[in-house]
């Protein structure tokens, strides 16, 4: 298929662009296969380059012959284009609609994008499971790297290499996989160096209504316990939801079969409920009535903050079990690809200082989200403005980033990165020139040959200029566990601050002054 | 002292609201001015001091296994939950505190017994620190349009107004006196703020005694004079900050609002800010939400909404923005009033000043503003803050709302204010504590101390390190967004004493440490230049980058290793400065 067929009008002059907090720009609008471009053709004015895949929905308005297109983006930006001429406006609108809803992955921009920068370190090779395992090996010899899933046949959503207890052979893993949702047998998520406790994740056990059991599954998870120790199973579903899952073949680990484990149920919402929550939140933020009661009741009704609180609370619980109780933890929900990952990744942010660095955070996203099989493409296909019926969309990753932001606000000096980094990941998860967030699992990414055909987001981020932009000037390595507060008063709404740049620059200036004075002092003394 | 029935109770429990495990056992002492709880734990000398004048309410609860509970709510939003072993002891403490926290005469107020080590001359200097005339000269007054009027020199025209007032050049004494007779409590229209750039002014007064049809020629002339003192404009706004219904109800009592037909060239505008009773109830409801034990997000947001508190804060800010726009953008003068012109009017005028003039966003400026628009114009602090035993219906958090409006603006414009949140909280505490004489409406001031001078002396504690007076976004007029999501719950004030919920690291403290260090190095550098021989004695930090880092993390919290820097109580601040490690190194040198 040729993109040209979809572009009815490639170019319109005299288009006016309106963006929040920015001056309007008048210029020429061009449509290409992947971008909507507005350029004033003057120096010093910023051009707009918007990926079609970033467009969530559009609205058309007409006043006389002047048409306006309101473009609502997946990254939650809303821009307006005033287009002279009714026909041009209609053509542009239908072209954008067609181009922004292309279904085929192989037509996505990352397959066409050629980097304008030199790739120093290929991000596709930066976070290989074997490298992560080398770090683990330096701390413990109780785990091994299994190749049981090398052709993705045991578990289609797992990577080819996974860390499992040393005493468990591949045959056992195959059996366990048949007992867990989506073949997601328990694997290592995190090893707590301080006390040797571990966090594992899995899919729900397939006990069904007649209480099926799997000796191999019991053996596998018991193999992670020290003699005489008990562990905790954190089920992200309420007990009712978990019981209901039995009817569909799912279920819970019964106390009788897992006597060494204590099960705790939490209530993290999933899929459609979250998508609706995001839609309601964004709608509340855009409410033009400026009525305080209405805002607060809409904010409350969106339940967004409740989800943030619930996820953080569960992550704190997991971290507490490991660090305070000295117990190992197994986390799962239903599939083990959404709420489970929110909990395991946030618990690591709390426990492990290395996850709070720029590179460490990439490693975390890579391990606990991309390789762990969070279906990014399904979850991020639509955002808050989409008019079409949600299918499998849900802001699971965005909620994770929001929770990280909450912790960052409470510990502003403990993260190497700033808020901009989280915003960047949010944007790229929904629309990107890079291939990192394409596909739903390692298997799909391999099939699409993403490492060969696209550029990794990490190749771009891990360059000097970008790192500098994303660095938190207040960072001081904090080697300790950081316990966030989850009181409602402590949780804020993650909004876009207009003045973040001013603050950032001011902080930099203050630090530079100290540095200059220190240097002067040093040289002067040594002179 | 005769009111103390029991000076000391042993084995008292101080309960922790959030986690009962953290409760502490100790001895409770009652002194003439404070309730003091001293923890028994060996090795630590942990004391909790509560000023009697800060006690807002006392509540005895049904006995529990840990004793007889006594709940103390403070005006600075501290809540103390004691459990006292015996019923009689609890009763005695309750009765003693009830009397001690409600002084019956001014002489009992804490400011008359607060005696820091300062001689009389210094104390006099403290009071001379604040000079309102200097602020009016800063505005360029008096000038060709505005003059200083001696009309109220002896407080004869209005006993709640200051002696020195600015009125339009053309306002004659008969006009002033005539107008004052037509206004509640004699509070005639007078100047609050003058904009040098465009001659527009903010004036304030009380409501006119217009009833259904009464007129007053002098009052009409007074407004005409205000209008004429702004040569660039041919009309002025009259802003009634009350809801229209309230204003209409006042007409039946012979009061009311200006009739546009009787005054030439005025545009009359209602801005519905609710009255003191609505505000008191609203804050009470919000505080109940703050005190909920582990609320869900919905409990909290629903509670916050039904309290209406943020809606009222928005109303005050919206009113301030209306006036700001009139003055700065249209160049039109505004007369603001409510009923008596000392509550809503004070709020709205002072909020407008903060928005208009960068000076009021400095440390000194905010103090001047409170002195001018609140103290000098007769805000009834003693009634509103319940300094003395009195009518509970007169109590209202009017000044709290002003301070919160400033805080909301600081959240939106983090680089536009010279002072920090701690400054606002300290002012708030001392408005209620009666430690200083500033908020006591009585001419006994010379025997008390002034808060302004205390704050100024300790100003380094209150500086916002992010302040950028040179930045384009912070100069001139502030244009805040009033979208509801821009209004936040002020955790730092209302949940100030709930340590667990505050950020565990503070950007502000971090930057302040860096700035202090920079200053130290500069001083060292200067002294080194003077005496080069000293160089051999100075210890050099190993890694210059780490010096700032070290000083922050050395006072670590056992749980997270994070210095708990954000929860220092401003009231005891003067005694809790931690010497940081670098200071120690340098002073040893």
Image (cartoon, grey):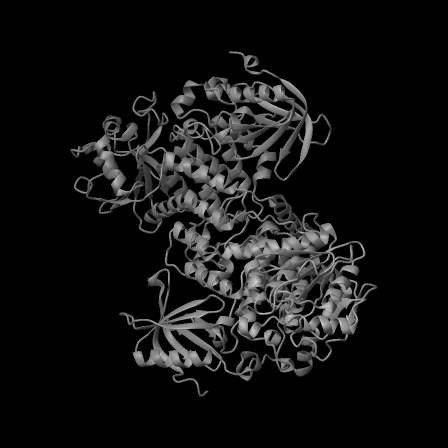
Residue A115's quadrant in the figure?
top right
Q: Answer with left or right where residue B7 lies relative to residue B234.
A: left
Q: Answer with left or right where residue A41 lies relative to residue B498.
A: right
Residue B294's quadrant in the figure?
bottom left
Label total for image = 0
The outermost residue toward the bottom is B2
For the question of whether residue A203 can be seen, the reply is yes
Q: Residue at x 53, y 65 (%)?
A: B276
Provide residue A185's location: percent of width, then percent of height: 28, 31
Q: Residue at x 17, y 35 (%)?
A: A211
- Against A148, is A190 above or below? below
Provide residue A165's location: percent of width, then percent of height: 29, 35
Between residue B297 and residue A89, name the one nearer to us.
A89
Provide residue A134's location: percent of width, then percent of height: 40, 33
- Against B394, is B321 above or below? above
Between residue B491 and residue B335, name the one nearer to us.
B335
For the question of whether residue B511 can be seen, the reply is no
Q: Quadrant of the C terminus of chain B?
A: bottom right
Between residue B325 and residue B176, name the one nearer to us.
B176
Provide residue B518's location: percent of width, then percent of height: 65, 56
């Amino acid at each position: 298929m040729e993109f040209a067929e979809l572009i009815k009008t490639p170019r319109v002059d005299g288009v006016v662009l309106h963006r929040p907090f920015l001056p309007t720009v008048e210029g020429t609008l061009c449509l290409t296969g992947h971008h909507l471009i507005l350029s004033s053709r003057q120096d010093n004015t910023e051009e707009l380059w918007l990926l079609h895949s970033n467009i969530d929905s559009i609205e058309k308005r007409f006043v006389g012959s002047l048409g306006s297109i309101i473009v609502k983006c997946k990254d939650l930006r809303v821009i307006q284009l005033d287009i002279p001429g009714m026909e041009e406006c209609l053509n542009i609108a239908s072209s954008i609609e067609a181009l922004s809803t292309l279904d085929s992955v192989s037509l996505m921009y990352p397959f066409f994008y050629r980097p304008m920068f030199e790739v120093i370190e290929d991000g596709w090779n930066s976070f290989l499971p074997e490298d992560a395992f080398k770090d683990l090996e330096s701390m413990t010899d109780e785990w091994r790297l299994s190749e049981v899933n090398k052709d993705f046949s045991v578990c289609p959503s797992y990577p080819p290499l996974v860390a499992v207890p040393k005493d468990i052979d591949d045959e056992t893993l195959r059996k366990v996989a048949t007992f867990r949702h989506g073949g997601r047998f328990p694997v290592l998520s995190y090893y707590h160096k301080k006390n040797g406790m571990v966090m594992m994740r899995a899919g729900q056990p397939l006990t069904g209504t007649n209480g099926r059991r799997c000796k191999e599954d019991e053996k596998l998870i018991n193999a992670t316990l020290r003699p005489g120790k008990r562990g905790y199973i954190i089920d992200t579903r309420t007990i009712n939801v978990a019981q209901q899952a039995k009817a569909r073949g799912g279920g819970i680990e019964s106390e009788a079969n897992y006597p060494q484990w204590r099960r705790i149920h939490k209530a993290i919402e999933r899929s459609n409920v979250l998508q609706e929550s995001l839609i309601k939140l964004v709608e509340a933020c855009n409410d033009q009535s400026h009525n305080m009661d209405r805002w607060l009741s809409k904010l409350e009704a969106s339940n967004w903050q409740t989800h943030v609180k619930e996820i953080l609370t569960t992550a704190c619980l997991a971290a507490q079990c490991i660090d305070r109780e000295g117990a190992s933890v197994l986390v799962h929900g239903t599939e083990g690809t959404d709420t489970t990952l929110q909990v395991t990744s946030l618990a690591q942010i709390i426990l492990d200082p290395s996850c709070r660095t720029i590179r460490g955070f990439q490693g975390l996203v890579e391990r606990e989200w991309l390789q762990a099989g969070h279906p990014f493409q399904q979850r991020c296909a639509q955002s808050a403005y989409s008019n079409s019926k949600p299918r499998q969309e849900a802001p699971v990753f965005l909620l994770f980033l929001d929770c990280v932001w909450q912790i960052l606000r409470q510990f502003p000096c403990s993260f190497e990165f700033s808020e901009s980094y989280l915003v960047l990941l949010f944007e790229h998860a929904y629309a990107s020139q890079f291939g990192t967030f394409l596909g739903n699992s390692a298997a799909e990414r391999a099939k699409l040959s993403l490492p060969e055909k696209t550029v990794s987001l990490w190749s771009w981020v891990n360059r000097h200029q970008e790192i500098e932009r994303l660095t938190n000037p207040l960072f001081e390595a904090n080697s300790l566990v950081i316990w966030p507060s989850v009181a409602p008063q402590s949780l804020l709404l993650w909004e876009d601050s207009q003045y973040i740049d001013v603050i950032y620059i001011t902080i930099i200036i203050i630090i530079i002054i100290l540095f200059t004075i220190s240097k002067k002092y040093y040289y002067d003394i040594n002179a | 002292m005769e009111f103390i029935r029991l000076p000391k109770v042993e084995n008292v429990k101080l309960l922790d609201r959030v986690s009962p495990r953290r409760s502490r056992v100790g001895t409770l002492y009652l002194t003439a001015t404070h309730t003091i709880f001293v923890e028994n734990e060996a090795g630590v000398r942990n004391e909790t001091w509560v000023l009697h004048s800060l006690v807002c309410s006392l509540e005895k609860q049904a006995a529990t296994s840990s004793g007889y509970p006594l709940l103390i709510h403070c005006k600075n939003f501290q809540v103390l939950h004691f459990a006292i072993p015996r019923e009689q002891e609890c009763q005695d403490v309750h009765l003693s505190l009830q009397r001690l926290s409600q002084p019956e005469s001014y002489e009992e107020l804490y400011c008359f017994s607060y005696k820091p080590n300062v001689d009389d001359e210094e104390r006099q200097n403290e009071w001379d620190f604040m000079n309102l005339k200097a602020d009016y000269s800063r505005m360029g007054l008096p000038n060709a349009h505005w003059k200083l009027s001696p009309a109220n020199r002896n407080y004869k025209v209005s006993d709640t107004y200051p002696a020195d007032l600015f009125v339009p050049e053309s306002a004659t004494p008969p006009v002033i006196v005539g107008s004052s007779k037509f206004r509640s409590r004699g509070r005639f229209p007078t100047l609050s703020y003058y904009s040098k750039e465009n001659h527009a002014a903010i004036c304030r007064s009380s409501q006119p005694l217009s009833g259904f049809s009464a007129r007053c020629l002098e009052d009409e002339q007074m407004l005409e004079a205000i209008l004429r003192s702004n040569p660039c404009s041919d009309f002025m706004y009259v802003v009634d900050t009350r809801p229209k219904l309230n204003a209409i109800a006042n007409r039946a009592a012979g009061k009311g609002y200006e009739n546009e037909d009787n005054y030439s060239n005025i545009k009359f505008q209602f801005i519905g800010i609710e009255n003191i009773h609505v505000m008191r109830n609203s804050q009470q409801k919000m505080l109940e939400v703050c005190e909920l034990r582990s609320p869900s997000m919905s409990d909290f947001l629903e509670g916050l909404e039904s309290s209406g508190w943020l809606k009222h804060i928005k109303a005050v800010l919206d009113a301030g923005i209306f006036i700001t726009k009139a003055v700065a953008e249209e160049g039109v003068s505004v007369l603001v009033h409510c009923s008596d012109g000392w509550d809503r009017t004070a709020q709205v005028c002072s909020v407008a000043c903060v928005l208009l003039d960068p000076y009021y966003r400095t440390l000194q400026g905010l103090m001047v503003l409170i002195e001018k628009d609140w103290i000098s114009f007769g805000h009834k602090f003693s009634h509103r803050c319940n300094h003395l035993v009195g009518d509970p219906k007169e109590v209202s958090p009017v000044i709290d709302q002003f301070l919160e409006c400033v805080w909301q603006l600081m959240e939106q414009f983090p680089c536009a204010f010279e002072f920090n949140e701690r400054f606002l909280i300290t002012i708030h505490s001392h408005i209620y504590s009666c430690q200083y004489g500033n908020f006591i409406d009585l001419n006994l001031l010379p025997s008390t101390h002034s808060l302004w001078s205390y704050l100024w002396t300790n100003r380094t504690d209150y500086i916002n390190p992010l302040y950028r007076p040179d930045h384009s976004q912070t100069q001139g007029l502030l244009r805040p967004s009033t979208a509801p999501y821009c209004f936040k719950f002020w955790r730092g004030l209302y949940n100030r004493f709930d340590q667990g919920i505050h950020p565990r690291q503070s950007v502000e403290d971090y930057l302040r440490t860096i700035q202090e260090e920079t200053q130290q190095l500069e001083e060292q550098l200067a002294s080194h230049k003077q005496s080069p021989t000293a160089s051999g004695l100075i210890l050099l930090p190993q890694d210059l980058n780490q010096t700032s880092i070290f000083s922050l993390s050395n006072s670590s919290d056992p749980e997270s290793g994070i210095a708990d820097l954000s929860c220092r109580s401003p009231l005891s601040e003067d005694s809790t400065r931690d010497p940081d490690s670098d200071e120690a190194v340098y002073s040893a040198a």
